[in-house]
Amino acid sequence: MALREIIILPDKRLREISKPVAEVTPEIRKLADDMFESMYDAPGIGLAAIQIAEPVRLITMDIVRKEGNGKSDPRAFINPEIVGASAEMNVYEEGCLSIPEYYADVERPAVVRIRYTDLDGNVKEEDADGLFATCIQHEIDHLDGVLFVDHLSKLKRAMVVRKFEKAAKRGIKYV
Ligand code: K1U
Ligand code: ZN
């Protein structure tokens, strides 16, 4: 396993559309291991491969760790797709490891049905609700070059992007 650097706004690679994984190879499993290590270290509850500059459709997640009760449920999603969404919406205050120290309310479908391949190569389908629904939608957005600030008003998004552009020019590093 290796700790990898998480890329930060305004890095243009965050806007790339990630490529599907053709086969679950040892390289993909190694990438997932690196992502788990980097996600736990950050710390975060989710990570898309593009956040460590790997433009492939792979996500890691552990929403159980958030409770801080010593339990964990590491999960990996390969080529995840949303195949259904509820009309009911939910608002959650989101954060992003690629936009450090900025949080904002985002409205998304409360329940989504997802299809994905697991690390054993099995195609699976399941319903996601609560934080799982929020997090999987946030991470799938990353695979399509979309950031949670894109769901905010133009003014709010412009303010955040400008702040991070200025910080990058001044060489300010978020650790
Ligand atoms: O994709 C990412 O940038 C990770 C992001 C996932 C996410 C959080 C909240 C709503 C939607 C998606 C994070 O993990 S931000 C950090 C965070 O939420 C957290 C960190 C430590 C403990 C608990 C939560
Ligand atoms: Zn994010």
Image (cartoon, rainbow, N blue to C red):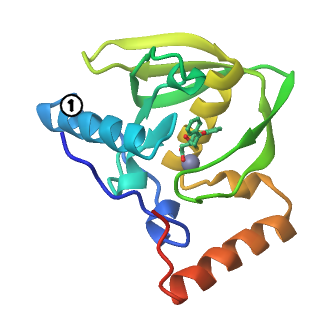
* Image location of residue 143, percent across then percent down: 49, 46
Residue placed at 65% from the left, 47% from the top? 95
Whether residue 21 is visible here, answered yes or no, is no
* Image location of residue 163, percent across then percent down: 68, 77
* Image location of residue 10, percent across then percent down: 55, 73
Which amino acid type corresponds to the residue marked 1 in the rendered image?
A: Arg
Categorize mark 1 by other alpha carbons within 10 Å: few (<14), some (14-19), many (20+).
some
Judge from the rendering whether residue 11 lies leftward or rightward of residue 23; answer left or right. Answer: right
Q: Residue furthest bottom?
A: 170
The N terminus, quarter of image: top left
Judge from the rendering whether residue 170 lies leftward or rightward of residue 123; answer left or right. Answer: right
Residue underneath mark 1: 29
The front one of 156 and 141 is 156
The front one of 170 and 154 is 170
Which corner quadrant of the image does residue 107 belong to?
A: top right
* Image location of residue 159, percent across then percent down: 78, 73
